[in-house]
């Protein structure tokens, strides 16, 4: 399968300055999305996953991983970028999900360079796969880091988010192909 440029490359010319700007913008957008919070325990519901997956599909794997890495670095440096304006120390129960953002950025970004951001079905598939990555690492950390049983981790850290993440995936499945139509 031939690699295609991420959608953002059709809008902004490829340059180091643009790459830096896009990476920073992705990290900031993710931080803003984290502030849309529905409080839940041990993991709050936010728009972070929507931002992560959309950024990955739009920017491609390298810039998505860089953007999510910067996002985590901002929180580790003490900036209040995580859910409810918290820094890394306050969100350690969710560290698996945050690491999952980086891996999902790689997966969804790589799929986008193979055409998985251009049709609703392909976007839905790539977002489902990205969500599975985030859930697996997030729930895995709840088991390892918090000592929850696997069933308790799934009940607390996966099941409550399935409907919301499905709605976000449907929204993206509608938006990304529409964006491709406008820039072709």
Image (cartoon, helix red, strand yellow):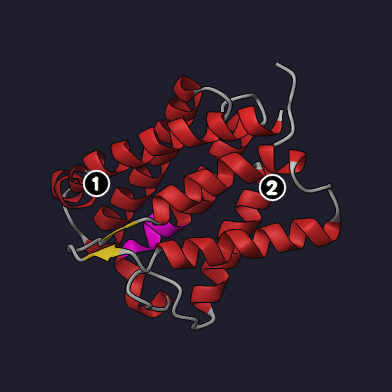
Report the residue at 38% width, 48% height from top. Answer: 137
Report the residue at 57% width, 44% height from top. Answer: 56
**If the image is split into quadrants, where does the N terminus sit?**
top right
Considering depth in this image, is 181 or 38 the residue closer to the camera? 181
Secondary element under disc 1, as helix, strand or loop, is helix
Dominant secondary structure of the magenta stretch?
Answer: helix
Residue 106 in sight? no
Q: Name the residue under label 1.
A: 161
Horizontal placement of 158 versus 64: left or right? left
Neighbour tally class for label 2: few under 14, some 14-19, many 20 plus, Cα within 10 Å? some
The stretch in magenta equals 94-98
Residue 178 in sight? yes
Report the residue at 25% width, 54% height from top. Answer: 143
**If the image is split into quadrants, where does the C terminus sit?**
top right
Neighbour tally class for label 1: few under 14, some 14-19, many 20 plus, Cα within 10 Å? some
Does 21 lie within the magenta span? no
Residues at circles 1 and 2 in contact by the CB criterion of under 8 Å: no
């Amino acid at each position: 399968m031939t690699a295609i440029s991420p959608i953002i490359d059709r809008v902004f010319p490829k340059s180091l300055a643009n790459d830096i700007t896009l990476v920073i913008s992705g990290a900031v957008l993710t931080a803003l999305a984290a502030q849309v919070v529905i409080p839940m325990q041990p993991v709050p519901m936010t728009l972070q996953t929507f931002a992560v997956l959309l950024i990955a599909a739009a920017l491609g794997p390298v810039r998505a991983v860089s953007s999510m890495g910067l996002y985590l670095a901002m929180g580790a440096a003490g900036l209040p970028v995580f859910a409810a304006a918290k820094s890394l120390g306050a969100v350690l129960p969710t560290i698996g999900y945050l690491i999952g953002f980086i891996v999902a950025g790689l997966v969804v970004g790589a799929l986008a360079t193979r055409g998985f951001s251009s049709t609703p079905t392909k976007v839905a598939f790539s977002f489902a796969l990205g969500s599975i990555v985030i859930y697996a690492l997030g729930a895995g950390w709840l088991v390892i880091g918090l000592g929850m049983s696997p069933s308790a981790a799934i009940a607390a850290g996966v099941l409550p988010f399935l409907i919301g993440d499905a709605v976000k995936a449907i929204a993206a499945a509608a938006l990304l192909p529409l964006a491709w139509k406008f820039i072709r």
